Image: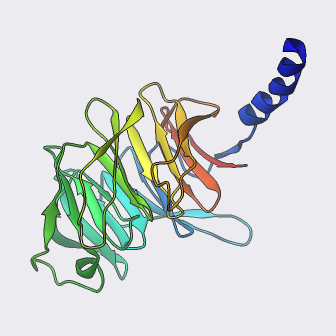
């Protein structure tokens, strides 16, 4: 009986290990961060130059965007970024427009809300009614400070996921008007985490290993367990959209992965 059980288990393990097909993206180098949503991809390189991916019939091109940023995000609430002074911007009609608020990291992947963390690791949320439509520069925005302390967090259709300075993981249900019931602890350690617009969750730990959360549904927004994603190199940043995993290695090499 033991021998037969082993024979049955080995193929399933191997299938999991070889499930992802990754190709190096050779026409962009030295990326620091990448974000994908709704078929769009944006990125920042080590020189803080922002780019967006322009898809073509023959090849895809990375187009330089104006300005310098240290973090960029794209999602249902638009394209947003922060510079090295933690100044917050929204990308409108081909240019960056400064908006009220200071964040070190920002995410636009939630249900038309904007979230982010400031330099003190304080999490904030901007409700959907304030993110829709153009706001003139300098107009006040109703930012809501959330409980807890996080260094990085991201939202999707079923809730938000975050990591703190100790790499502990947390989950929060967050409404369009930023109402919440606080953070819930989730097992394992990750140094960054991203939520896709379909609810998929991927993250990277301090060693550069990539993991994804299984079993996430509207009824089980926290999912059930973590699964290891075998990639070619140690990674520092990942983002997932429409069946494709974008991963930036610790050496700045970008990969596009599918399964």
Q: Quadrant of the N terminus?
A: top right
Front-most of residues 13 and 184: 184
Residue 109 in the figure: left or right of residue 229: left
Please report the residue visible at 44 percent of the width from the left and 61 percent of the height from the top: 158
Examine the rendered structure and indicate whether residue 84 appears above or below residue 219: above
Please report the residue visible at 46 percent of the width from the left and 24 percent of the height from the top: 207
Examine the rendered structure and indicate whether residue 196 appears above or below residue 40: above
Please report the residue visible at 22 percent of the width from the left and 79 percent of the height from the top: 130
Residue 3 position, x and y percent, is: 88, 13
In which quarter of the view is residue 190 placed? top left
Please report the residue visible at 30 percent of the width from the left and 51 percent of the height from the top: 70
Q: How is the image coloured?
A: rainbow
Front-most of residues 100 and 254: 100
Examine the rendered structure and indicate whether residue 125 appears above or below residue 163: below
Residue 47 position, x and y percent, is: 35, 47
Residue 189 in the figure: left or right of residue 58: left
Residue 52 position, x and y percent, is: 48, 64
Examine the rendered structure and indicate whether residue 17 appears above or below residue 238: above
Residue 198 in the figure: left or right of residue 97: right
Asked if residue 207 can be seen in this view, the reply is yes
Q: Residue furthest top?
A: 2
Asked if residue 82 can be seen in this view, the reply is no
Q: Residue furthest front?
A: 1
Residue 28 position, x and y percent, is: 55, 51
Q: How many marks?
A: 0
């Amino acid at each position: 009986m033991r021998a037969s059980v082993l024979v049955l288990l080995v193929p399933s393990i191997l299938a999991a290990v070889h499930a992802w097909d990754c190709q190096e993206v050779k026409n962009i180098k030295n990326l620091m961060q990448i974000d994908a949503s709704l078929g769009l991809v944006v990125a920042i390189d080590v020189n803080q130059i922002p780019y967006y991916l322009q898809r073509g019939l023959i090849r895809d091109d990375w187009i330089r965007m104006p300005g310098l940023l240290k973090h960029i995000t794209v999602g249902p609430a638009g394209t947003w970024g922060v510079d090295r002074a933690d100044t917050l911007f929204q990308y409108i009609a081909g240019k960056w427009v400064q908006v009220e608020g200071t964040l070190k990291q920002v995410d636009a992947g939630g249900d038309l809300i904007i979230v982010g963390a400031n330099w003190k690791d304080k999490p904030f949320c901007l409700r959907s009614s304030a993110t829709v439509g153009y706001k003139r520069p300098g107009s006040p925005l109703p930012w809501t400070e959330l409980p807890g302390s996080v260094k990085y967090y991201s939202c999707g259709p079923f809730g938000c996921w975050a990591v703190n300075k100790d790499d502990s993981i947390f989950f929060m249900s967050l409404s369009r008007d930023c109402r919440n019931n606080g953070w819930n602890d989730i097992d394992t350690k990750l140094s960054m985490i991203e939520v896709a617009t379909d609810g998929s969750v991927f993250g990277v730990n301090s060693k550069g290993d990539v993991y994804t959360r299984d079993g996430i549904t509207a009824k089980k927004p926290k999912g059930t367990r973590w699964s290891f994603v075998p990639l070619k190199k140690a990674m520092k940043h990942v983002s997932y959209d429409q069946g494709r995993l974008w991963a930036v290695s610790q050496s700045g090499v970008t990969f596009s992965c599918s399964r």
